[in-house]
Image (cartoon, rainbow, N blue to C red):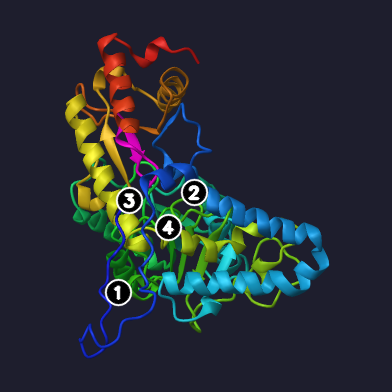
């Protein structure tokens, strides 16, 4: 991933290189080298093939040190930090995020702990719509069947409890095209509008977690507008640093993404974008503190004494990603190309297939595991994952796909591999060889104890 520096000739504006030569020609700095990347992530356990960046992300040493400086600044003089540093620092981070996601106003960007918190903020507002009789009992909230487990629980806690009618969009897996997603989504909206009901909120993933696939959010948001859905919330926990994120193009009312997964921030930090519109009600942080009523961005910037350093290192993270050729765009492109290459390598080695076409994945991809491993339940996926970690030093999540009626010897287990800048080809070879060894030994999940 390392690259040589760009070399520029020193020319005057009129193109004559002889008339004026600077005393000290300036060379642009070299891009980060492979050895420097290895050093930045040398705190990772060297015995583990860490091909699961998607779950918890990763943080380079440069950012860990920047975080430590913020923490020390607070501990040295907390009062000065609170009155003179904190709000200014968070505003600077919000401004950078605003530019990264192409939002119109910094006021549209709040910083919260994670996408789960952001979901609670949006769903809490929807729940008030039901409890305050602004919505009718039985009005619908639509979400994807592949929605993240914590968000499903949040919908249960806020929407179902308040009297909302929750509709899950069933999606097939493996997937072959976006058309399959769009067709099912349209059917769910029709169901939500049946009997004179209204769809008050659509919750759409940008990149689903398990199974993992990039959802055509722009198209789904457009359909929501055409079908009269009140509001659209995009849960994009994985998106920033992993796929294209543009608020003007996507057009959602609310959009959240973690910055600790694919944008190198320390845990935990996410942004919540709230489109500036008279139709969007005022949102509030569920942890109420002194700033209540001053707008979500200000409320979120102070929810009591805690460590705010992850929210303050965003400028340093921007410096870090800009050491790579092409910045974050270059990182995304190379991660996508590498994960597709490694996915194809594993599918070929095991005689299986990818869970979706390469264009429907970003920096993560699903690959079928050999059916002879006997993955027959969610419990089996956890047992196999633990076995791979403890016996082979491989960290990778596994998904159970229940066989459809009439299917015989179908693939029921899929792994989700990630690629981030620190990964090496050997990480994936280690995983390939571990599965091949299990197959050659006649291993099945039934042999593992609970």
**Which residue is label 1 attached to?**
226
Taking depth in this image into account, of 128 and 375 the one nearest to the observer is 375
- Distance between the alpha carbons at the discs numbered 3 and 4: 29 Å
- Give the number of the mark in front: 1 or 4: 4
- Give the number of the mark in front: 1 or 3: 3
Q: Which mark is residue 236?
A: 4
Mark 4 and mark 3 in contact (Cβ < 8 Å)? no
Across and down, in percent, residue 15 comes to 20, 86
Chain part drawn in magenta: 413-425
Q: From the viewer's perspective, is residue 27 above or below residue 266?
A: below
Which mark sits nearer the N-terminus, 1 or 3?
3
Across and down, in percent, residue 354 comes to 22, 38
Which image quarter: residue 398? top left
Which mark sits nearer the N-terminus, 3 or 4?
3
- Distance between the alpha carbons at the discs numbered 3 and 2: 41 Å
**Which residue is label 3 attached to?**
2
Asked if residue 307 can be seen in this view, the reply is no
Q: Which mark is residue 152?
A: 2
- Distance between the alpha carbons at the discs numbered 1 and 4: 22 Å
């Amino acid at each position: 991933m390392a690259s040589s520096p760009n070399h520029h000739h020193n020319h005057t504006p009129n193109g004559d290189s002889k008339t004026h030569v600077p005393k000290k020609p300036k060379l642009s700095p070299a891009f980060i080298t492979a050895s420097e990347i290895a050093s930045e992530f040398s705190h990772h356990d060297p015995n583990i093939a860490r091909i699961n960046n998607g779950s918890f992300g990763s943080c380079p040493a440069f950012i860990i040190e920047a975080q430590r400086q913020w923490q020390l600044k607070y501990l040295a003089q907390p009062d000065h930090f609170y009155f003179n540093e904190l709000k200014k620092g968070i505003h600077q981070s919000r401004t950078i995020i605003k530019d990264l996601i192409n939002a119109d106003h910094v006021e549209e960007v709040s910083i919260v702990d994670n996408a789960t918190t952001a979901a609670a903020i949006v769903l809490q507002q929807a729940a008030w719509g039901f409890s305050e009789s602004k919505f009718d009992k039985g009005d619908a909230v639509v979400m994807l069947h592949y929605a993240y487990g914590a968000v499903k629980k949040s919908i249960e806690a806020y929407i179902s409890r308040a009297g909302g009618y929750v509709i899950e969009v069933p999606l097939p897996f493996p997937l072959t095209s976006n058309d399959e997603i769009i067709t099912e989504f349209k059917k769910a909206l029709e169901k939500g509008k049946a009997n004179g009901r209204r769809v008050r909120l659509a919750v759409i993933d940008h990149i689903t977690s398990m199974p993992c696939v990039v959802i055509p959010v722009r198209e789904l948001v457009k359909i929501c507008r055409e079908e009269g859905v009140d509001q659209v919330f995009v849960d994009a926990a994985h998106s920033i640093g992993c796929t294209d994120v543009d608020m003007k193009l996507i057009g959602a009312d609310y959009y959240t993404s973690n910055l600790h997964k694919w944008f190198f921030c320390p845990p935990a930090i996410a942004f919540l974008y709230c489109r500036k519109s008279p139709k969007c009600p005022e949102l509030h942080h569920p942890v109420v503190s002194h700033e209540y009523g001053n707008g979500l961005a200000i409320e979120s910037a102070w929810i009591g004494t805690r460590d705010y350093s992850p929210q303050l290192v965003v400028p340093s993270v921007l410096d870090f990603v800009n050491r790579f050729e092409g910045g974050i765009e270059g990182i995304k492109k190379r991660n996508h190309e590498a994960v597709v290459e490694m996915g194809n390598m594993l599918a070929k080695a095991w005689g299986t297939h990818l869970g979706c076409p390469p264009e429907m994945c970003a920096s993560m991809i699903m690959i079928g595991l050999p059916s002879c491993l006997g993955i027959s339940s969610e419990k089996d996926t956890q047992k196999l994952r633990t076995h791979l970690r403890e016996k082979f030093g491989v960290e990778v999540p596994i998904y159970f796909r229940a066989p459809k009626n009439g299917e015989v010897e179908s693939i029921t287990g899929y792994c989700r591999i990630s690629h981030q800048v620190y990964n090496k080809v050997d990480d994936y070879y280690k995983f390939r060889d571990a599965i091949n060894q299990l197959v050659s030994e006649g291993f099945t999940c039934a042999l593992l104890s609970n």
